[in-house]
Structure formats: C-alpha cells, structure tokens
Amino acid sequence: MRMPLFRGTKQRMLLFVAGAVLSSLLFSACGGSTSILNTDGPVAESESFIFWVILAIAGVIFVGVEAMLIYSSWRFRERPGMPAPRQLHGNTTLEFAWTAAPAVVLLIVLVFTIRGLWQVAPENRPTTGKTEVVEAIGHQWWWEFYYPSYNITTADTLHVPVGETIQVKLYSNNVIHSFWIPALTGKTDVIPGHNNSRWFIADKAGVYEGLCAEFCGLQHANMRFNVVAEDSTSFDTWAISQQQAATAPTSGSMAAAGQKLFTAQCSTCHGIIGVDSKAFVDPSQACDNPNGTTKDPCYVGPNLTHFASRATQGNGSQQVGLIAGGVLENNLAQCTPGDPNLLQNCNVAKWLHDPQGIKPGNDMNIGALSTDDINKLVAYLKTLN
Ligand code: CUA
C-alpha cells in the first residue's frame, strides 16, 4: 500500500517554523553580559574558540547529512508502477567509511580541546608582565575576595587591573561552588579541601558579570558578583584606600548611634577594621582553621570596613555595587536617613528590615530592627567609604 508522503506536511511546517522562531529567540538571549561569546580576555577567547570549531564541524556535518537526506527522499521517492528497489545487504567500504569518519572528526575536536586546555591551564599563565593574586572564597551565598599583596578583603565586587594576569585561588569551607566570569574566564569548581586556581586577563576596562555555576543550595542563583576592570593606577588607588581603617563617625551623630548598634548587634558576623576588628585576615586561612593561631575571628558575613565604597557608582546606568550576592543593588545614594520612604528607596534598608524575606535561608538571622535602628545603621554604613 502506498503511504501518502506529504500527509501532515502543514503541521510539520508549522512545527518547524515555531522551532526556528523559538531557537532564534534563545540565541538572541546569548548577546548579554553572561554570554561566553562576548569575550574580553585571552582565556575566555580560547574557550569560545573551541565552541566555534565544534559548531563549524557540526554545521558542515548537519548540512551534508540533511542535504543527502532531502536529495535521497526526493530522488528515490516512490512513483506509481515502480518496481521494488534493489535490495542491498551491506557494503564493506561504506561500513569502514562511516566508522572511521566520526573517529577522525572527534580526533580533530580533541586536538583543539587539548590545545585549549593547555592554553588556559593554571601552570601556563603568562609569566611576563605583572601578576595580581586574588583569593576568591565561596560562601553560602556570596563571594569574598582577599588580596594577599595588599592584605585587603572585599565582597561582591572583584577589582582587577586591566592587562595584568589575575591569578585567582579558589577556596570554600562549606559546599562546592563554581567560579565563573563568562566574558573573562570559564567555570572552575571551588571545592572544600581541594584548592583550585584559575587565571585570566581583562583586556579592557569595564564591569563584567560573575556568578556561581554549581548548585550550592537554596540561594545558588543569588551568588553573583561584579568584576570591575580598571587601569592599574585606579586599581592601586582603590587598593590603598581599602587598606585604611574605617573613619570614626562624629560623636553624637546618628552615624555614631549606628556604630554603637553595629557593635552590639552586628559585630558577631561582620568585621569593621578599627571597630571590632584589628586588621584584615586571610579568610581562606582563618576560616579553614577555626582552632588555628589567627587572632582575628573568621566572620560569617562580609567585611564592612569600606561598605560605602562598594555602592553603585556614577549615574546607575552600570550596576556596580551589589548586596548579598547580587540579590539587591547597593544604591546607597538613594539612602537618606530620616526619609519616610527609606524602606522603599534604599536597598540596604530593605535588606536590614527583612533579610530572610529577600533571600530566604541566608546566614543573616537578626531579630526585627525598628525603623529608628535601621535609620541609624544606614547613616553609619554611609560613612564607611
Ligand atoms: Cu555557590 Cu552556586
């Protein structure tokens, strides 16, 4: 019996068109800052090159196979009165060919992959030029960054000098995270007890998005950070400013009341140099050795010594400052103590008001703060430049 070849063609065409539209929408989403194809450094470039090689090979195979399929379906289609086709049973040459061809294709992919792995390997980071070492510590759920050569700690924003090799040492004392800056470097697991490292170079100044790429608990999606790549002079200025202790608020001011409140309520989890903490400590060492010799404690939350310097800069068109792993923008400019709409306008006030509502499961378990207390704390946090 003859089967009508084009039965349901319309439906299939519709399906095809819908599929094409959907996939083009998906691909258009790849233009954002978390695209691995918008690269701004040699490591990410080397990685995206492997993608293009595989895409090109797969594209040639796809077009070839589809062309043969369409041609054969048309050329050898059934016509009225046609005899049964010639029956073939095996063709040794073809069998060898289609066994060998995929092996050759995979070998080509393997060569490019090994070349890429070699280029980005930690031991092959460039030795010419300057290298900045940064420790990235994965917490549940935010990133802490420690610069051993400056002995400074920051959170949620990673500053790097443009053109210099950044060697990132990755630590976790909780679960496995994955460090990822799509435009600059691929993912590397951050494993407790197994210290990985990664290098990258930012070719030009800008703000890049970083994120955790390994499911690490309830708030895994809110474990983002920003990378500020700046010229080496700006970087040095920033690093030196971070070395200073916090300036003491004017006595009797609202900020001074906020500092008092900080010492009473927040200092178990947050450090501020000159207030509850003497100096920055290497978190990877302190936190890994709870019974070690480190005199300063290992804090659960971010060091707040220069919290205000981590706020969004400029006109806000570029979101730089983040709070709590990127769940909120650090918009301190919109925070005016005494503002009756403080809880609507000021993100850090929102955070202080209800951290568990904004990011359920995070480590900030504080009792309800009064609006008065929140105003005092915001006034104090604004002084921490
Ligand atoms: Cu850390 Cu996902």
Image (cartoon, rainbow, N blue to C red):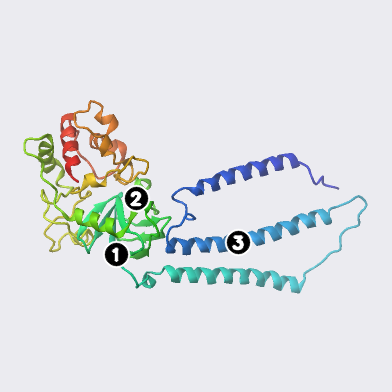
Three-letter code, disc 1: Glu
Three-letter code, disc 2: Asn
Image position of 127 (left or right of 366): right
Question: Real-space Cα distance between discs 1 and 3?
Answer: 36 Å
- Which one is closest to the eye, mark 1 or mark 3? 1
**Circles 1 and 3: CB distance less than 8 Å?**
no
Residue lying at the far right of the rendered structure: 81
Which mark is on residue 123? none
Q: Earlier in the sequence, mark 2 or mark 1?
A: 1
Question: Real-space Cα distance between discs 3 and 2?
Answer: 32 Å
Tag 2: Cα neighbours inside 10 Å, few (<14), some, or many (≥20)? many
What residue is pinned by disc 2?
226
Residue lying at the far top of the rendered structure: 340
Q: Earlier in the sequence, mark 1 or mark 3?
A: 3
Q: Circle 3 sits in a helix, a strand or a loop, which is it?
A: helix
Which mark is on residue 56? 3
Can residue 84 be seen here? The reply is: yes
User: Residue 172: x and y, percent?
Assistant: 29, 58
What residue is pinned by disc 1?
132
Tag 1: Cα neighbours inside 10 Å, few (<14), some, or many (≥20)? some
Q: Name which quarter of the figure residue 158 lies in.
A: bottom left
